[in-house]
């Protein structure tokens, strides 16, 4: 058992006892099997989804440590710590924080539509977006620097159509996954994708060139890269 799992087990027991839960009640709150929760309290390494659910509940109880601690090994600021989360206007957020799956760049590129998104993912991230189909993608490349960087996490809204000037993540039939700023020329049926990085020139496509294109609601910064 390493220091990280020992610390998680200790905090899990502290949270449960502070709220007066037995293991069955705690498991129900965290959406876990009671036997799995018992293993976590005994020092089993938590999965990403279980860890994120617990950290949300821990913070609600006023018990959670800050980012970069043993409870947050990925070095991510969660959505309630707004200085490191970019939220884009025009989208509805709610008070209910939930865990969203984080797909790798390659995983997202394998899906030609939302129904083909993989059931397994590389991690989870907390968010308050209202789209029930929302998921996240870990960005790759430098085309959106300096605003967004390699390793940042973009939260996507599949149920909402992107509009002019928004940042999107798109899967192109012949080029794969891109994160860009989108502009539409309705009279010419053209979509222009541009970058913050001036080294990447704007590119034009037609709607039929895309498998899918989803607007970005939030971007969570990868603090481990910045601080490491």
Image: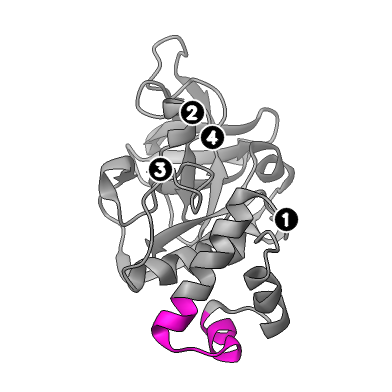
Q: Is residue 16 magenta?
A: yes
> Which residue has dot 4 on it?
139
The part of the image, by quadrant, that contains residue 97 is bottom left
Q: Are marks 2 and 3 in contact (CB under 8 Å)?
A: no
Residue 10: in sight, yes or no?
A: yes
- Crowding near pointer 3: few (<14 within 10 Å), some, many (20+)? many
Circle on res. 219: 3
Q: Are marks 3 and 4 in contact (CB under 8 Å)?
A: yes
Which residue is found at the position 43% from the left and 43% from the top? 68
> Which residue has dot 2 on it?
225
Count of marks placed on residues: 4
Tell me the distance, in whole angstroms, between the alpha carbons under discs 1 and 4.
17 Å
Q: Are marks 1 and 4 in contact (CB under 8 Å)?
A: no
Q: Earlier in the sequence, mark 3 or mark 4?
A: 4
Q: Residue 184 placed where, x, y %?
A: 39, 36
Tell me the distance, in whole angstroms, between the alpha carbons under discs 2 and 1.
26 Å
Q: Which segment did they paint magenta?
A: 15-29
Q: Is residue 37 magenta?
A: no
State the residue lying farthest toward the top.
199
Circle 3 — which element? strand
* Magenta span dominant secondary structure: helix
Q: Are marks 2 and 1 in contact (CB under 8 Å)?
A: no
Q: Residue 163 placed where, x, y %?
A: 36, 46
Q: Earlier in the sequence, mark 4 or mark 2?
A: 4
> Which residue has dot 1 on it?
118
Q: Residue 217 placed where, x, y %?
A: 38, 50
The part of the image, by quadrant, that contains residue 208 is top right
Q: Are marks 4 and 2 in contact (CB under 8 Å)?
A: no
Q: Nearer the viewer, residue 100 or 111?
A: 100
Q: Residue 43 placed where, x, y %?
A: 67, 64
């Amino acid at each position: 058992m390493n220091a990280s799992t020992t610390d998680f087990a200790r905090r899990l027991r502290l949270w449960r006892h502070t709220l007066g839960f037995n293991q069955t009640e705690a498991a129900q709150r965290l959406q876990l099997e009671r036997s799995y929760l018992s293993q976590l309290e005994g020092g089993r390494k938590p999965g990403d989804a279980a860890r994120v659910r617990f950290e949300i509940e821990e913070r609600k109880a006023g018990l959670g440590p800050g980012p970069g601690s043993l409870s947050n090994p990925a070095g991510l600021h969660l959505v309630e710590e707004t200085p490191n989360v970019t939220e884009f206007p025009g989208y509805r957020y709610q008070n209910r924080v939930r865990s969203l799956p984080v797909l790798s760049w390659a995983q997202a590129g394998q899906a030609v539509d939302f129904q083909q998104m993989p059931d397994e993912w590389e991690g989870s991230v907390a968010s308050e977006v209202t789209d029930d189909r929302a998921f996240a993608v870990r960005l790759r490349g430098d085309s959106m620097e300096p605003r967004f960087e390699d390793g940042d996490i973009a939260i996507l809204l599949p149920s909402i159509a992107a509009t002019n000037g928004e940042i999107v993540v798109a899967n192109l039939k012949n080029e794969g996954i891109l994160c860009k700023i989108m502009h539409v020329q309705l009279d010419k049926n053209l979509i222009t994708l541009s970058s913050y990085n001036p080294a990447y020139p704007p590119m034009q496509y037609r709607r039929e060139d895309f498998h899918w294109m989803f607007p970005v609601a939030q971007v969570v910064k990868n603090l481990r890269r910045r601080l490491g």
